[in-house]
Every structure is written in structure tokens, then in C-alpha cells.
Image (tube, rainbow, N blue to C red):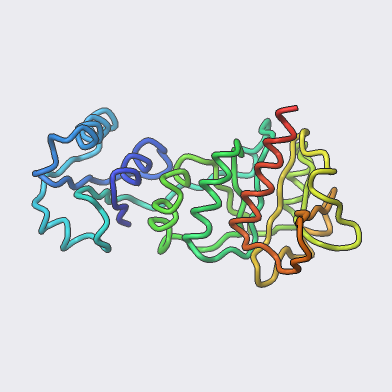
Amino acid sequence: MIFEGALSVKAVIQGKKRDVREVWMDKIKRNERDFQYIERLCESNRVQLKVKSREEIDGYAQGKTHGGVIAIAENRRFDSIEALKGLNFILLIEGVEDPFNLGYIFRTAAAAGAQAIVTRSRDWSFSENVICKSSAGISERLLWVLADDFEKSTIRIKELGFSLICAVRDESAIEMSKADLRKPCCLCIGGEMRGLSMAVLQQSNQNIYIEYPTDTKVALPAAQACAVLCFEVVRQRKK
């Protein structure tokens, strides 16, 4: 698959989550500082660097925002659920299919200090380049676990010491500010269409909701809800 733009190219090399076959670089931009850094990355990681014309890169790239550099890489090596052991803040994301929104979630999660994201197993290969770009490369650096069975996975997450905190409005839910998010937790956030499945909700330690200062009844989009909830974790852990 092809990753386009300096941020994405640096991320796929530095993340070491996939084998990078080669990097194509615009010969006109080769002397620019950012491009020189990528060249050093290629050398230190034994990635083949090819200097090409802009026309050649344009003809091979999928989009027009590559800025003169692309990486051709193999499929990603995803992380196992056991890699979550010893962490203290992770996310479980369900039902978010749009690669741009998932990329935004990765970016937000990392900014707030989350260390891993768990999603359902599916073939992401056709959208990983978009996820990488929209996450500013974070998706290549953060742990990403694919789960075949959310019921078994959530049970194992709890066995690893995490409280399962589910974002859902029901009779048992409390305001996010009243939940204890200082201990190791797994924030579970569902997409706007279906929310979280029963496989996840049945394992919940606490359901929470975002309190609004208005009478608005609509739910926030998943990426925005993720930002609010993640930074509530930040706020509480600063105390």
C-alpha cells in the first residue's frame, strides 16, 4: 500500500509496524530539511530510497497531497491483546467505519495519553493510508489491537486490570465527572449509528455520559465524544 506525505512516510518508518519496501522522493525537494531527515531515516532503517521526478510520483500516488514523497509498504502487524498488560489508559472503539474519523480518534487518544486502541477485526488495508494521514501518523505509532470476539476481549481486558467505562446514556449511567477515571481504564465508545454492542455493555464496570450545559438531546459524533471523554481522564489525573 502507498503512504503519502512526509508525516505519513516518517510514521511508517519509525513505527516499525510494517515492512517498508521503498520510499520515492521528489528530486527537486531532496535538499529540503524534512526530506533530508527522511533520507537519514531510510538509511538507518535500511529502506530503499528512490529519487524520482514529480511527474513519476504523481503518476504512482493515489492522491495529490503527497508533497513529493511516498512510501510503499506491506500490511501492518497488529498488536495482541496481551500487549495491553501494564498500561493504564486504552480505548475500545466500535462501529466507527469512516477512516478519517478513526484517524481523528487515534490523534485525540494519543494527545490525551491513551496508549492503545482496540477495534473489531476487519480488513483495514484499503483505508490504512487515510487513517495514517488523518491521524498525523499516530496510527502507526500507537498500539492497535484487532479483536475477533468483543465479549472475550473485554473479559480479558478486565483481567488485565482495566475498568471498562462505557459511554452510553441509560438509567445506570453517571456524569463523566463523577466517575473515577484515575485508575487504569478502558474507555468504550461506539459509533453514532448503533453505539456499543451488548457484548461490550454486559462487561461494563460503569456507564457514563457527557453532561451538557443545555437541553440538547442529540449525541456527539464519536470522534468529538472521544475528545471530551479522553480529556476528562486527563483532567482527573492531574488532581
* The N terminus, quarter of image: bottom left
Q: Is residue 89 left or right of residue 30?
A: right
**Residue 150 percent across, percent down from the top left:** 71, 58
Q: Which residue appears farthest toward the bottom when viewing the image? A: 193
Between 173 and 44, the residue placed more toward the observer is: 173
Where 181 falls versus 153 (above or below)?
A: above
In which quarter of the view is residue 237 placed? top right
Q: Which residue appears farthest toward the front when viewing the image? A: 214
- Residue drawn 41% across the image and 38% down it: 15
Between 165 and 232, the residue placed more toward the observer is: 232
**Residue 231 percent across, percent down from the top left:** 65, 42
**Number of numbered markers:** 0
* The C terminus, quarter of image: top right
Between 41 and 37, the residue placed more toward the observer is: 37
Where 30 falls versus 196 (above or below)?
A: above
Q: Which residue appears farthest toward the right when viewing the image? A: 171
Q: Is residue 42 left or right of residue 126?
A: left
**Residue 3 percent across, percent down from the top left:** 32, 52
In which quarter of the view is residue 83 placed? top right
- Residue drawn 66% across the image and 44% down it: 230
- Residue drawn 76% across the image and 56% down it: 213
**Residue 81 percent across, percent down from the top left:** 64, 44
- Residue drawn 82% across the image and 38% down it: 180
